[in-house]
Amino acid sequence: MRRSVKWTAVAALMVVPLGAAWAQPVFSPSQDPLAGSRVFGGKGCVKCHSVNGVGGKIGPDLGRIQRPRSFYDLATAMWNHLPKMTDRMQQLGIPRPKLDSREAGDLIGFLYTLNYFDPPGSVEAGRKLFSDKKCILCHTVGGIGGVVGPNLDFTKQFASPIFVASALWNHGPQMAETMKARGIDRPAFTGAELRDLLAFLVPASAGPREGPLYVLPGRADVGRQLFSEKRCIECHAVGGAGGRVGPDLVELGVRRSPLEFAAAIWNKVPAMAQAMQARGVPVPQLRPEEMADLVAYLYSVKYFAEPGSVSRGWALAVDKGCLFCHGVYGERGKPASDLTRAKGLDSPAGVVASLWNHAMVTAAAPGGKKRPWPEFRPQEMADIGALLQALGRARQIP
């Protein structure tokens, strides 16, 4: 897939155990969003689906689906649309690809991080913000503006929200001091305002882009390491463990768009820099790829946000008709479809792989009549997943 931004690949690092801070499930080594992007291409998903305009046009653009989406939102969408997708692939002569547990985890990790892409902003609103927020007093764009700050002409990287977040973090303290010295009130931005501002800056400073921007997601495991190495954990807790100077990032709910994240960074930089100075913590510099890794980690700490219920899963298995075709513990004389004999159901990703690989897309009820394909809501999918994982664990008991 064509990319307008190319970053140097980040080497995989060993994760340092940090105790209870990581009690919430995160991306495991078998759930790598970067590897998931390769699954997306290698398994042929890109033939039907595009990502922010890059790829096939048969199915919806997965970079522009409604957000936010959790693990089970995505799992539910994959299951509910399986019959329709299967029919379309048959019409096009595309074999339905099989997924193993690793591939399913990687793919969903990639799809989950597709909310790296925000809706397009307003150029006119951005032009007005550039003046109203006093950016024009220090920065030049299109030959117009101040010369105190760097010239923003030809800065194509503003098309990447992760680059923007990195730049605002690295230069935020210096910009705050400069504005204070010049008597300029430091402006605050919402995510929508920053989106509009960038919509103005990109074409004004660099001309139209050659094609849609496609940014690979960061590595959550590397971001987890950086969160410790950059000493973020000294001020921020994650799920109750860590510093108390700043808010708990899990309780705060950080599953926001990258531009909302960048706006929050800009708005909080002075307070964060002051708190770090008081504690003797130097403000770390972050390369764009490191910011991408941190963002991936911050998303992942609530990746499996809603736990399922085994008891509700049993009720759904009956109500949705799963037990018309599947047996459990040797019942109904169907060993081939006995859920307690199925392999690979010991993880959420394994469950999703099994659901995707479902042999019978339209199950036949007793008497030869076809039953309607059961659809699930995200919480119901979490409950079914909890049941299937429990059955998978029961299989492992001698």
Image (spheres, rainbow, N blue to C red):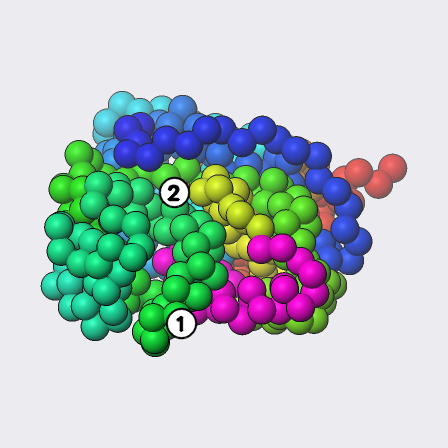
Q: Which residue lies furthest to the right in this view?
A: 398
Q: Which residue lies furthest to the front in this view?
A: 181
Identity of the amino acid at label 1? Lys
- Residue 320 visible at all: no
- 187 or 249: nearer the eye? 187
Image quadrant occupied by the N terminus: top left
Measuring 80% from the left and 38% from the top, which residue is drawn there? 396
Position of residue 299 relative to residue 226, above or below, is: below
* Mark 2 crowdedness (10 Å alpha carbons): few <14, some 14-19, many ≥20: many
Identity of the amino acid at label 2? Leu
Left or right of 338 in this view: 81: left
- 4 or 99: nearer the eye? 4
Question: For numbered disc 2, what is the local secondary structure?
Answer: helix
Measuring 14% from the left and 41% from the top, which residue is drawn there? 208
**Residue 124: quadrant of the picture:** bottom left
Position of residue 247 relative to residue 154, above or below, is: below
Question: For numbered disc 1, what is the local secondary structure?
Answer: helix
Image quadrant occupied by the C terminus: top right
Q: What residue is shown with label 1?
A: 180
Position of residue 132 relative to residue 348, above or below, is: below
Q: What residue is shown with label 2?
A: 82
**Residue 258: quadrant of the picture:** bottom left
Measuring 34% from the left and 65% from the top, which residue is drawn there? 191
Q: Which of the two discs, 1 and 2, sits closer to the camera?
A: 1
How far, Cα to Cα, is label 1 from label 2?
A: 57 Å
Measuring 18% from the left and 52% from the top, which residue is drawn there? 141
